[in-house]
Image (spheres, rainbow, N blue to C red):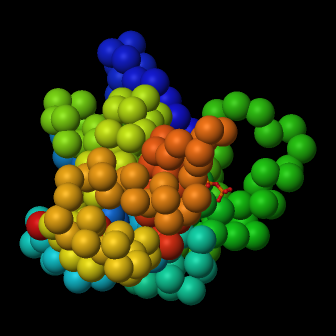
């Protein structure tokens, strides 16, 4: 979902979020494990004040495990219970239920002292577009989710998915807006494909990716697009020349035999986004 954000959108989303957060005990925030800073919304701390909190580093299957561990430790330091997941893989969600109990321990204890027993925790999932909120809800809620959706007569309003006797999930996620102030954030979001490529043209975006890869993951481009001549170019020349090498290597040619650098850029971005270049993080703690 590529939303074109403008101030009106943000005001509306903020208002909706404020109302929904009132209904829950726990806010489960999803971020993209490859860019945990760029994919976080800076206002969430204020919006979720007073609520139990959790942060899920999603798409961990695409991210560099060392970088992700660093982020998880940082979030834990900030008292946010962090779990790395691949929302498409149910196995990776096993730890989430335990983390929910941990995150809500104080509240459960408070309830118990007041004689309130077995009241389920109510939780909602929030995050910027494309971080995997719907995928997570579907995988986590599984059959329960389908059952709610199939009930006739359900129209508008908040629906709760009962996961078990101790947890209920709001069926629609809260959509947060991304950070806008920093240019690198926009570039990172475009690189992972979360916002339209129009923020920069594809060739420029691919060049930014090449620069990051050369600095942080030396050898990775040579391995995929190398060959003797190409490897020398990858080591020594500027990003655009490397893109031309990718075009040669992958036979991206225009009708007259000229290199189709634009197609090579799209191909490189696509291979990065789909994990074909390996598990790569664009941000470290
Ligand atoms: P949203 O509700 O937050 O907007 O995100 P959504 O669940 O729609 O997920 C956005 C894309 O990210 C989807 O891909 C989804 O399959 C993918 N995705 C979600 N979680 C993970 C994960 O942990 N790992 C990986 N590798 N991908 C994940 P899509 O291409 O837009 O759709 P589809 O082709 O999968 O249907």
Q: Give the x, y percent position of residue 34.
A: 32, 64
The answer to whether residue 267 is visible is yes
Query: In the depicted view, which residue is nearer to us: 38 or 218?
Result: 218
Q: Quadrant of the N terminus?
A: top right
Q: Give the x, y percent position of residue 144.
A: 72, 66
In the image, residue 42 sits, relative to residue 272, either above or below, namely: above
Tell me the residue at 34%/72% (across/down).
229
Q: Give the x, y percent position of residue 48.
A: 27, 46
Tell me the residue at 39%/13% (across/down).
8
In the image, residue 261 sits, relative to residue 74, either above or below, namely: above
In the image, taking residue 100 as reference, residue 171 lies left or right, namely right
- Residue 116 location, quadrant: bottom left
- Residue 55 location, quadrant: bottom left
Query: In the depicted view, which residue is nearer to us: 115 or 192?
Result: 192
Q: Give the x, y percent position of residue 178.
A: 32, 37
Total marks drawn? 0
Ligand 1's image quarter is bottom right
Query: In the depicted view, which residue is nearer to us: 68 or 246?
Result: 246
In the image, residue 135 sits, relative to residue 1, either above or below, namely: below
Q: Quadrant of the C terminus?
A: bottom left
Tell me the residue at 37%/53% (across/down).
243
Query: In the depicted view, which residue is nearer to us: 10 or 247?
Result: 247
The answer to whether residue 40 is visible is no
């Amino acid at each position: 979902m590529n939303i074109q954000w403008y101030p009106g959108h943000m005001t509306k989303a903020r208002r909706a979020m404020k109302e929904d957060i009132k209904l829950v005990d726990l806010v489960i925030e999803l971020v993209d494990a490859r860019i945990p800073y760029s994919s976080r919304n800076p206002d969430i701390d204020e919006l979720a004040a007073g609520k139990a909190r959790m942060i899920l580093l999603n798409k961990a299957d695409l991210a560099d495990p060392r970088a992700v561990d660093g982020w998880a430790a940082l979030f834990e330091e900030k008292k946010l219970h962090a779990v790395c997941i691949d929302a498409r893989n149910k196995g990776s969600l096993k730890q989430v239920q335990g983390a929910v109990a941990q995150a809500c321990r104080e509240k459960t204890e408070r309830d118990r002292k007041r004689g309130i027993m077995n009241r389920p925790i109510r939780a909602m999932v929030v995050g910027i577009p494309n971080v995997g909120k719907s995928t997570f809800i579907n995988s986590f809620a599984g059959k329960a989710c389908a059952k709610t959706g199939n009930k006739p007569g359900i129209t508008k309003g908040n629906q709760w998915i009962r996961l078990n006797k101790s947890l209920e999930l709001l069926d629609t996620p809260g959509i947060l807006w991304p950070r806008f102030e920093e240019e690198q954030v926009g570039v990172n979001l475009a690189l992972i494909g979360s916002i339209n490529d129009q923020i920069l043209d594809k060739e420029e975006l691919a060049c930014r990716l090449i620069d990051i890869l050369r600095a942080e993951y030396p050898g990775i481009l040579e391995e995929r697009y190398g060959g003797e001549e190409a490897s020398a170019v990858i080591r020594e020349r500027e990003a655009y020349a490397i893109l031309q090498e990718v075009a040669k290597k992958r036979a991206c040619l225009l009708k007259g035999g000229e290199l189709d650098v634009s197609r090579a850029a799209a191909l490189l971005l696509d291979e990065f986004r789909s994990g074909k270049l390996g598990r790569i993080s664009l941000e470290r703690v």
